[in-house]
Image: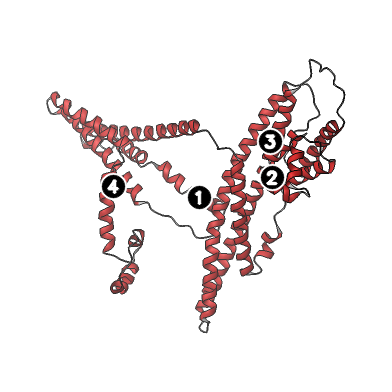
Amino acid sequence: MAQFLRDLIDLHGITLRQLQEAVPYGKSTISDNLSGKVPPKAFVDAVVKAVVTEPRKRALDLERAHRLWQAADKPPSAAPQSPASPGGALAVIEKTNDRLAVMTDRTLELQQERLGAHQLTLLLLRLVARLQEDLDALTAAPAAAQEQIDTLTEQLRIARQELELARQARQEAELLAGRAQAQTTTLQEELAQLRTAMPPTDINVAVSVHNAPLPPELQEEYFLADVDRALRTAEGFLKEGVQRRERIADDLPEPQGTGQRSQLQVWQDIALLTGRGLGGLLMMGGAMLDYALTTSFGRTYSGFGSGLVLIGVMLLVDPWDLYFDYWPILRAKVRREKGEYRWSVNLNSMYSRLFRVAWGSASAGAAVLSVATVFWWTPWLLLLTVPATLFLWLKTIRSDSIPLVNVMLQLTKQVARLFPGTPLAKAFEIEPSPGTASSSASASER
């Protein structure tokens, strides 16, 4: 019985200090009862009720705790165990079922956290839109008070900030919910395998429960009735969500082992390099085909390889990375969330892609020279053009041109200094000097 109570406490992540605050017993009494001393039945009830929060699971644990307490309080006479007795395997099933029940609770909490964050995101989007409309209308009014404009401007700033935090909270909750659901599925499969090797028992498998309704603070009518109250509600919900996710994340295992993650990364790298290699081959093949047809049949047949070249260029720019970078914005568009969506441009990534296409073009040019050698020059020149083509093709696949990209970034920064106040200058965090404030404003308009 003491072991059952200790396992129950450990599974739910309750410390001795937290348990002491939840039950009407002192620290020494709790330690004695958990070390093997037969406690009063009221102590067992208090511990189970303080540790287990889900009603269905609490009823099952109370029933089992009562059976163990009766056996500990009035132990039966020793009797030989039948060979078919499940023994330790039954304890393994019970412990696995307890772990499954705890993970079910965690999954439910994360589902509620995700739904709450999604509802808060939608409400904040409506609040931001309404505040923006009020601010535009107040600014256009000729007799508008500056104090009201400042108040609305500050409320709009805070609402946008809370909106970004709500989106991040929703994404984190989705990731944690996926991890919890995966662990729940693993425990369910493990429990099913254990039960198939055992005779029928009266152990009830932990089941999922229905989602609880959203709190009244996140109901639309209540939330949008008062702006200041809505912002306080959003701030409080997000702070509680951070603490809740941190607490649950500590109980969840990592999504995959280090070896599995590295293996997945290897497959991703292989797929990426394969796409780049195929793109380089298509560029070389298209250029060689165009040159061979033009040389053999005239310019009338030129252009057949241009399609292959364009496909190769598309593969070399790695469109998959762009898709994953802009997936959050695309997802918000699909969900019809109205708000501000900022499409940012990563100069480092853009220059890296441009240089990769340049290496691919160079390899295509070297391949064309190899074909020209067959038509016009001595075949001995292939000893130079073929290795050069192979080298440039490998450079297209493997090289990210980091030194060249850094040089281009420095040159772009120098150009940005000529136009202070523009988006390009802000990207490099170049602040306009006081003497150039007016000129930067005109440059920004241009």
Q: Which amino acid does label 1 sit on?
A: Pro
Q: Name the residue under label 3.
A: 99
Q: What element carries label 2?
A: helix
Q: Where is residue 150 in the image (x, y as percent from the top left)?
A: 51, 75
Q: Looking at the image, which residue is at 55% across and 59% down?
A: 163
Q: What residue type is labelled 3?
A: Arg
Q: Distance between the residues labelled 1 and 3?
A: 34 Å
Q: Nearer the viewer, residue 403 or 419?
A: 403
Q: Residues within 10 Å of mark 4 (few under 14, many from 20)?
A: many
Q: Which of marks 3 and 2 is in front?
A: 2
Helix, strand or loop at disc 4?
helix
Question: Could you tell me the amino acid type at mark 4?
Answer: Val
Asked whether, in this view, residue 336 is left or right of residue 87, the answer is left
- Of pointers 4 and 1, the one earlier in the residue sequence: 1
Which residue is disc 2 drawn over?
Answer: 16
**Whether label 1 touches label 3, CB < 8 Å:** no
Which is in the foreground here, disc 4 or disc 2? 2
Q: Where's residue 284, x and y in %?
A: 27, 33
Tell me which numbered mark, 1 or 2, is placed earlier along the sequence: 2
